[in-house]
Image: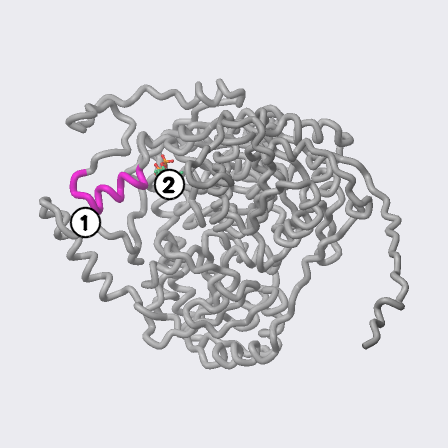
Amino acid sequence: VTDTYSTTKPIEVVHHEETVRLTVAQALLRFLARQFTERDGTRCRTVAGVYGIFGHGNTGGLGEALSATPQGEFMFLEGRNEQSMVHAAAAYARATRRMSTLACTASVGPGSLNMVTATAGAHINRLPVLVLPADEYADRKPGTILQGLEHPRAGDLSVNDCFRPVARYFDKITRPEQLLVALPAAMRVLTSPEDTGPVVLCLPQDVQTEAHDFPSRFFEERTWYVDRPAPDPEAVARAADVISGARRPLIVAGGGVFYSAAEEALRRFAATHGIPVAETYAGRGVMAKPGWCSLGGLGVEGTTPANEAAREADVVICAGTRLADFVSGAQSAFQDPAVRFVGLNIDRKDATKNSACAVVGDLRCSLSALSSALQGRRITPPEFEATTAVRVDAWSRGLAEFVGRSASGERMSQLAMLRVINDEAPAGSTVVSAAGTLPGEVLKLWDTSGGTHCHIEFGFSCMGYEVPGGIGVALANPKKPAIVVVGDGTFLMSPSELVTAVQNGLRLVVIVSENGGMHSIRRLEEAFVGRPYANLFRHRDMWSREFGNEPVALDLVAIAGGLGACASRAVDAAELRKTLQEALSDLTRPHVIVVPTDPSLHMGRNEVWHDIAPAEVSADPRVADVRADYDRKQSARQRRFL
Ligand SMILES: Cc1ncc(C[n+]2csc(CCOP(=O)(O)OP(=O)(O)O)c2C)c(N)n1
């Protein structure tokens, strides 16, 4: 037996690798500063800025590194609340169509944990955010630490493990060289249309400051191309076949239309093939202009023509939507027994929902391929088009009539308030809304034909998104105002990020609807509980739970003024118009306008059923009635399998 190896000379490989000695935090920022996203020839920084609140967990690490970055390399904002920072970053990502985002740094323990809620929101809304929570000492030398979890059964657990289920990509950087793998992976997720969401990189406070010889090549400029994957031609042919046979087709347009920059393509598709379009919360504004095929919002808070079209639809083309329950009426909105779905989505999970004939790919490409396959054919028969046009017209007139009627009482309705705001909002401005009754009313009423944009966060509907959401939008679109509409309950929960808007001179107008309570939930109580027990801002006895008549003396104008905004009150439509005009003409600092509104003036629940279960047993006979009604409607309307 010959040992061939023994005769072979060893090959010596010498790496002449240039290195640069940096701390983990310095390396992270240097890397981020050189990452770019490009689509359709437009290129921008993947992570354009850093939003931070500092403590002992990140001052010596990311704080030091940030202070040493050249001016102009990163925009930097100081947050007031860590949750708000991540909301703002998510809103920024959405307003840039997911082409760019912000990194959020927080200190160890509570500061980092405060970011979990908004990280979940970004996950649900499929928005890229780079979350950088500080973590406990990796070397464990200090023993028991302030803000440490000290879990009795797992030495490697920290509060940051709460991020795992809400992160699209999660890592703990316990050694500097892990960055060489973790950062490219983070970029892949942040820039991947089918896989994007929040990336969480936990940074133990000692590791942030640790130095390492990083290869210089790691810091070379890199571009992440957001490509437009074309759909499989056979999938397109199958979808065209389904659509060709439709008699009452409907398109449901979701937020994915904006992420793919496919609004124009969708409008063209709808016009060419004569198919009406209903919009989800995230897709609101896709159609831009009124017309017979522009049905408005769909679902529990949608318009009558959209919901009638959904109820009767035999083919539903889902374009860039997750089909969440407020839109699908918890699987009750589509009532044709033989209804079929076509799912156009970059994400296979969404494309295949409701047993859809799935077309997986970039939405703009899919629409164009599908349009070619349909060869210019108009799908909707003329009589159904005429019926739809009549319905759209009747809805618009009914809405206008309600708005007019509810504008002139002692307090106006929120819809009347929104109408004034919509009239005054300049082209290019964006209305922002997230929780309470306002998102549903924006969905119903907002008209984008004047060139405004809609930004409704109703995937997570997180109270407290609104003001930071406005900040994210204002950062993405600094020349135009972000107009935030928010309920008084939500404003009270989290007004503090106004200070950041003031500090950075952002063009923000916040309109607070002061209706004296959390009326979206009060209405639910009234409908489902029998004995409403909460949600009014009135003095009460905590044991008897009785409310008195006296309101809690809240001064929202003073709160906003105290946070540095230019704050005022507008009690009727004329005053609101004037105050808003003044605010919009002087956007050197944020404005807050508090508007008293009447919670009893709303359009009521529409025809779409929604799955909210009342108690199955109760001493109150009213609850038993409500439950019986629920059971009846659930079995009659909710589709068990689509
Ligand atoms: C963080 C968070 N907590 C609780 C809820 C549940 N919730 C939805 S709307 C709402 C009340 C909102 O009150 P307000 O802002 O005054 O608006 P209104 O309901 O009066 O329109 C609550 C508690 C939520 N969406 N988000």
- Asked if residue 317 lies left or right of residue 507, the reply is left
Name above or below for residue 603 compared with residue 592.
Answer: below
Q: Position of residue 493 (x, y in %)?
A: 41, 30
Residue that mark 2 sits on: 436
Looking at this view, is 548 or 263 the one in front?
548
Image quarter in which the N terminus is found: bottom right
Looking at the rendering, which quadrant does residue 520 occupy?
top left
Looking at this view, is 242 or 493 the one in front?
493
Q: Where is residue 561 in the image (x, y as percent from the top left)?
A: 49, 19
State if disc 1 and disc 2 touch (CB < 8 Å). Answer: no
Image quarter in which the C terminus is found: bottom left
The magenta stretch spans which residues?
519-531
The amino acid at mark 2 is: Gly
Looking at this view, is 624 or 166 the one in front?
166
Give the residue drawn at x 58%, y 77%.
376
Q: Nearer the viewer, mark 2 or mark 1?
A: 1
Q: Tell me which label, 2 or 1, sits earlier in the chain.
A: 2
Circle 2 packing at 10 Å, graded few (<14), some (14-19), many (20+), is many
- Asked if residue 272 lies left or right of residue 47, the reply is left
